[in-house]
Image: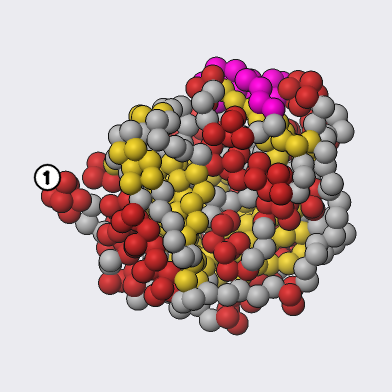
Amino acid sequence: MFRKVLIANRGEIAVRVIRACRELGIRTAAVFSEADRQSMHVRMADEAFCIGPAPPADSYLNIPNIMSTAELLGVDAIHPGYGFLSENPHFSEICQDVKITFVGPSPEAIAAMGNKSQARERMRGAGVPVIPGSDGPVRSENEALDISKHIGFPLIVKASAGGGGRGMRLVHTREDLRRAIQTAQSEAEAAFGNNEIYIEKYVEEPRHIEVQILADKHGNTIYLGARDCSIQRRHQKLLEETPPPGLRDRFIRVLGKAAAKAAHAINYTGAGTVEFLVDRDGHYYFMEMNTRIQVEHPITEMVTGIDIVKAQLHAAAGERLNVNQGDVETRGHAIECRINAEDPRYDFRPAPGRLAQFIPPGGPGIRVDTHAYAGYTIPPHYDSLVAKLIAWGTNRAEAIARMRRALQEFEIAGVPTTIPFHLMVLDNAFFRRGEVYTNFVQRRIDLSALQHAAG
């Protein structure tokens, strides 16, 4: 096992990795921007080093600064967390070149899944179902029009290097296609430095179901059930739960085997997530693979008892998985609500600022993953996640009841948060019946009611 690990990240995921390392007896080194000098991960790590100003490009995305810090501190591994450099094959390759272990898959595996159009073709070749669409990137408007004749409308234009909902445009008519391509390309160029796009048939009212996998360097791969991530806004997740309500165990096993097949196709190692769209008729399609730890990994930990971050570290150290597929059991139901410093009354507008009060909930079945505390200032430079609230119950009804109780106990003052939104979702009759889909928030949640309640 490693002697010292540098965490190339910030916020709650940096805290989460430090805790896993501490339990394994591994020393930790934190890096931080000038804006994060008072952050909890800086306080908790054995060593901490400032790597630059607040903007991510000057700090958490600054590979030379991070690598020089890693070599200066004598670390033998780097954990990238999620976001920032976690899915950057160049960063993984640099770690490999200087003999520092990257806690994640190989550069080749990251690159294989990083380009979404290429990933589609790779999965098609591996026998994993993909959504009908273009065979590789779309080069011209005429090519896009030809594809639309075969797959029909509505369709979705996507950035090949995309993520987080950026570089995506839904198209309902032939007349809107040109504008959608131009907009997606310019947005993709600005966000990812790559304007390549591809086209898929738009699956109406699908569920977003993902499968957590673990793989070692000895060819062993297992899956840890499935998570429903359909509660979203602007293609970004807000609430996740496991197991997905209404899906039979047999269907989840089918998804799990498809996810394992996807991992084997790219010689994947470590923790990863294969994401699928499931339509109203029960057909499933590969959407993408996230070659890193996921924000929502705690709910899988709650129902399986497997520490996924520790598993990442063991796999990166070259150890074999200590569980087989037959050993994996899921118990009960878990839900995660992302508590963001955003105002849901105004289209989830980010609201950075100082936390005048921060009292997290507790009690049976409740877990809070956070880097926040009373007096902490949420900087405007990064994402708005304040905490992840996780509730476990023996069944879905108990998990919902515990989550509702915990949300009401959670006291945060100084900034608006998504807590009122989550309470509205939990009280929604469609959600309680498990009738969720990716446009659930637009269709079933009346955000204007939150304005009236505040007024």
Instruction: Tell me if 230 is positioned left or right of 36 in this view.
Output: left
Residue type at numbered disc 1? Gly
Instruction: Residue 215: say if magenta.
Output: no
- SS class, disc 1: loop
Q: Residue, x 63% and y 54% (percent of image)? A: 289
Q: Is residue 320 above or below residue 282?
A: above
Residue name at image x 48 percent, y 52 percent: 368
- Asked whether residue 34 appears in the rendered view, the answer is yes
Instruction: Please name the residue shown 59% across and 31% down the image.
Output: 43
Query: Badge 1 is on which residue?
Result: 455
- Whole-percent x, y for residue 63 in the image: 69, 25
Q: Please indicate, yes or no, whether residue 136 appears anywhere in the rendered image.
A: no
| Region in magenta | 47-66
Residue 442 versus residue 56 in the image, above or below: below
Q: Which corner quadrant of the image does residue 430 belong to?
A: bottom left
- Which x, y percent locates residue 412? 33, 42
Q: Is residue 421 above or below residue 412?
A: below
Q: Is residue 61 above or below residue 188?
A: above
Q: Position of residue 125 (x, y in %)?
A: 73, 62
